[in-house]
Image (cartoon, helix red, strand yellow):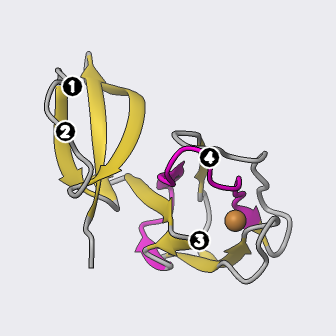
Amino acid sequence: MTRLYVGLMLAGGCVTAVACFSDRSAGPGVSGECRVPVTVIDSTHFIVAIRSFAFHPDSLAVPAGSTVTWVDCEDAGTAPHTTTSETAVWNSPNLTTGGRFSHTFATTGSFGYYCAVHPYMLGKIVAQ
Ligand SMILES: [Cu+2]
């Protein structure tokens, strides 16, 4: 399985840009980035990568109050995706390669979501 990584451009302690790549396609020459496995940036900020028409991870538990950012990690030219709450809590616009969308889970609960373009793409965030 290809591991996915998220490249973080860090400035002043804030995440100002998020890009993603796999270790298969990752190349040198991108300065100022650090590589971390997808999912955790810090204790209150998590990443879900969208890759190969699936959410990675497809189920993620986070502390209530956390922000989850979905990042479209597909190869350029791949069909767009969304992250769309099953209960209308959030709904992203179409995301293309490198696109991202964030939602903060202020309350506890289990939140199912899907891709509106490909409704077979399912995921779940559990805020606890
Ligand atoms: Cu999709």
**Residue 21: x, y in percent?**
33, 49
Cβ–Cβ under 8 Å for marks 4 and 2:
no
- Nearer-the-camera pick, 87 or 116: 116
Question: Can you name the residue that lies furthest to the top here?
Answer: 12
Cα distance in 3D space between marks 1 and 3? 26 Å
Residue drawn at the location 34% of the way across and 62% of the way down = 39
The disc label shown at residue 27, or none: 2
Residue drawn at the location 62% of the way across and 46% of the way down = 77
Question: In the figure, residue 56 lies in which quadrant?
Answer: bottom left
Residue picked out by circle 4: 77
Tell which circle, 3 or 4, labels the residue nearer the N-terminal end: 3
Q: Is residue 83 magenta?
A: yes
Cα distance in 3D space between marks 1 and 4? 21 Å
The secondary element bearing badge 3 is classed as: loop
The disc label shown at residue 53, or none: 3
The disc label shown at residue 30, or none: 1
